[in-house]
Image (tube, rainbow, N blue to C red):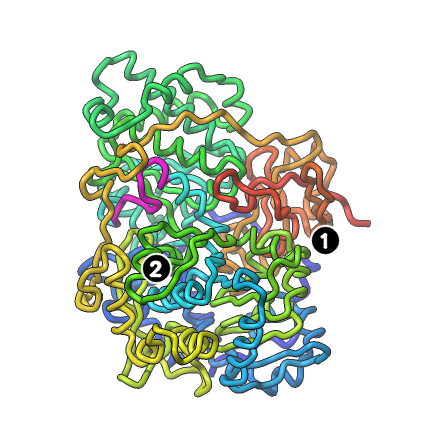
Amino acid sequence: MSRKPPEHDVDESELVVSKPKEWAAGLPGVAVSLKRSVEQMGVGRTVRSLKVLNQHNGVDCPGCAWPEAQGHRKLAEFCENGAKAIAEEATRRRVDREFFARHGIAELAGKSDYWLGQQGRITEPMVLRRGETHYSPISWDGAFEIIAEQLNGLASPDEAIFYTSGRTSNEAAFLYQLFCRGYGTNNLPDCSNMCHESSGAALKETIGIGKGSVSLEDVESADLLIVVGQNPGTNHPRMLSSLEVAKKRGARVVAVNPLPEAGLLRFKNPQNISGLVGRGTALSDEFCQIKLGGDLAFFQALGHLVLAAEDAAPGAVLDRAFIDAHTHGFDAYVEQVRDLDWDAVDAATGVPREQIAEVSRMLVDSKRTIICWAMGLTQHKHSVPTIREIVNVLLLRGMIGKPGAGVCPVRGHSNVQGDRTMGIWEKMPEEFMSALEQEFSISVPRRHGYDTVDSLRAMRDGRASVFFAMGGNFVSATPDTKLTERALSSCALTVNVSTKLNRSHVVPGEISLVLPTLGRTERDVQQSGEQFVSVEDSMSVVHSSRGRNAPASEHLLSEIAIVARMARKVLGAEHPIPWEDFESDYDRVRDRIERVVPGFANYNERVRDKDGFVLPHPPRDSREFRTTTGKANFTANTFEAPHIPEGRLLLQTLRSHDQFNTTIYGLDDRYRGVKDARRVVFVNPDDLTELGVADGAAVDLVSEWAGDEDRTAERFRVVAYPTARGCAAAYFPEANALVPLDSTAEISNTPTSKSIVIRLVPRS
């Protein structure tokens, strides 16, 4: 039997903190995976669900986008957080009409994100109208009637916003953007706007494609892996297995991060006896404890030192053949980094010069270098220039377009990369738009739509009044929480397609709809028979995912069915797109994707291969760079680093080990030593001494941003922690309230969630 959900929120007033772990996984990872799975699913369902997770013709993990191995796979091809993700989706707990009758909207709004998520699966469509205190059941037809009435009553299609989570399948994402463009808008914000938009912008400019250039085999055969702004032990634990393989083959690993993360120190692989009972594998050869936002300075310094090594040994360091044949802008880049201000580098990074020099020697010695990064790099004002500097360093040594080398932005959601490939972007290129028009005989708008930040501004300013979310938890994922809540509450209609209850459901517009959908673990049977969907991982591999469990309720619809039925109701029966055919047979969707999206030839045939297929990547495949210059571009970037005023700290938001994105699995952060608490702030002990704040003190966090009002997140407990000096960390979504909406990265418009100036205000 599965355990019932909690009846009350957990009291976090008694903070329990132990010493941070110096290794990840091992027996505790196995034990926690099984415990949480059995609590949610029961024994039998646990066995049935986990044995097909990430297996050939099985269920793709709804968590991170780290790829599976080609060919043979292990019996347990999942990590602790993957098991938790499956347990949350395949839970036996239910949120039915009786639940909503017991709990009014005011009560639900006072509950924590953890409590809301632990209640279980939503079983039927629900509606909340203006003046009502409780959600009540509504038929699917009734829900689509409301949506059609609201959308067709707008003065302009651009008054509607269509958000997407990274868990949406390729097929659902393609139909979703097709409906939106058929309706007449490019307002297609998605979670990538808040995460890896900076990566896409920098890579598109420098190498011609906004995706990573490496494969899993490349990672495991590299000589040197530099892992920056990333915590794989919590956010994508299966990456640790690949790093372990690389280490055993002789690779060196450099970790660059403000916090020492257990997974990058030592990995006890639970698949191996040595990982269960032995010491495991030490991963990082160097841990560069960098200050928040100091990464641009760090990589400029590395480039400077690589050029100096070439000066000392002409012809022995730089890959001049590659630079001359395949790159542009080398001389301007050299001029920019030759005259480096080392005092400024010291202040920006906090990393000793001799350690930076050692990393530069590793770069010079390595024949196969990969640089990996995640949101620790992408959520700063100068994120795009920082990632351009990573490309600069790799180009110096010809490390793109060769085995075991390249760029590796590690995406955090299972199909966030695939959604972009399918057209979920507010400014898709002309080639894609023209292909849509030709294939479906429709007119597609060309004006750029709103990204996530601009969508919030539009709702705030009254320029948008309908908000539709295909998955995700928009309120908890976005910055400036109070502003977000006000913006959504001002809408005439909010719609959330969801599997489980979350914060967004308790911030309703005048009318609020909650539409329950099938989870990835569930069987999807349509008129033509049982269906499957497909996803694209972080390394451009497209493969199938097929659910095996019975649906949580007979009233659930798949995301594809929801889009198709909504489109028929909104656009009318005479619309040229065959929505009924798409709902009946997902092969018909893939037939159309094949004719619109490059790289998907013979889609239905190739996706049925047990390993799927790899999409083209010109820089990786043939050193073809489809940039404005026709070559890989060196860039000259102005030196930039955050300024921290005296008496202040620079805060980053991050995940605990017991969550994935906004889904809170539990209240423990095992690797950082925190138990039963989330409202904590990690601060260096020396900073606490200077600030006169005691370890364990109760404080409010107040963020400061030029020209704007302060924002406050209340009731946090201070945890003395070995983070970089001047830096602090707190969990999101609790700390999202501190991120100003208008504080965004240049070019990408991504919220600056990793560089928030705060002060600690003791509570009386």
Amino acid of disc 2: Met
- Mark pair 2, 1: CA separation: 40 Å
Q: Is residue 207 left or right of residue 40?
A: left
**Few, some or many residues within 10 Å of mark 1 (<14, 14–19, 20+):** some
Could you say where residue 741 lies in the image, as x and y percent from the top left? 62, 48
Q: According to the image, label 2 marks what residue? A: 422
Residue 714 image label: 1
Image height check: is 584 above or below 115?
Answer: below
Q: Residue at x 55, y 63 (%)?
A: 156
The magenta stretch is 203-215
SS at circle 2: loop
Q: Is residue 750 left or right of residue 481?
A: left
Amino acid of disc 1: Glu
Assess whether residue 205 is covered by the magenta stretch. Answer: yes
Assess whether residue 407 is covered by the magenta stretch. Answer: no
Q: Is residue 64 visible?
A: no
Q: Residue at x 64, y 69 (%)?
A: 492
